[in-house]
Amino acid sequence: MPPETMHALTEMLRIVSEQEEEITCWDCDGDGFVKLFHGVVGCTRCGGYGAVPKITATWYETGKAIKRARLSRRVNLRDEAQRLGVNPMAYSDIELGKIDPATIAHLLPQNVALSRPEPLKGANDEKM
Ligand SMILES: [Zn+2]
């Protein structure tokens, strides 16, 4: 096997194992349930399991950034979901980091960082 193929395979395996790695659920602290004012309910983030895939921590951070961007435009959740053509429940789950935000990345304004920042383009090639 050529070294570059070997390298690509190793890198792929590393990414896969990172995605499968689990971390303690931050909503319930690993308990699998959360205390609300009217009692104790099963944790919706981890489904009562107490742990979540590590990748969802990234979704959570991105979801918060998406929510901040929406709030800065003073748009409510339902209107934003409608504007994007996304089910409001699904959109809410994205802001909460329960769904991979990449699923709606193509719909979001470019100022919401979903991946590595792109190099800045010249100020003159703004097209609207
Ligand atoms: Zn949980």
Image: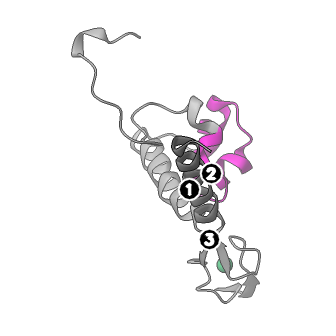
> In the rendered view of the protein, which quadrant contains the N terminus?
top right
Vertical position of residue 81 compared to residue 56: above or below: above
Residue at left 63%, top 86%? 30
Q: Position of residue 78 (x, y in %)?
A: 65, 42
Q: Nearer the viewer, residue 124 or 92?
A: 124
Q: Residue at x 63, y 50 (%)?
A: 100
Which badge, 3 or 2, comes first in the chain's sequence? 3
Q: Which residue is mark 2?
A: 94
Q: Earlier in the sequence, mark 1 or mark 2?
A: 1
Counting every numbered tag in the picture gives: 3
Up the image or down, 41 lies above or below 6; here it is below
- Mark in the foreground, 1 or 2: 1
Q: In the image, is 90 to the left or to the right of 111? A: right
Three-letter residue code for mark 3: Glu
> Within the magenta stretch, is there residue 13?
no
3 or 2: mark nearer the eye: 3
> Ligand 1 within 8 A of label 2's CB?
no
- Residue numbers of the magenta segment: 77-103
Report the front residue among 69 and 62: 62
* Residue at image mark 1: 59
Tell me the CA gap for discs 3 and 1.
15 Å
- Could you say where residue 21 lies in the image, as x and y percent from the top left? 62, 71
Question: Could you say which quadrant of the image residue 45 lies in?
Answer: bottom right
Magenta highlight: main SS: helix
The residue identified by callout 3 is 21
Spatial separation of the CA atoms under disc 1 and disc 2: 8 Å
In this view, 104 is above or below 33: above
Could you tell me if the residues under marks 3 and 2 are in contact, i.e. CB atoms within 8 Å? no
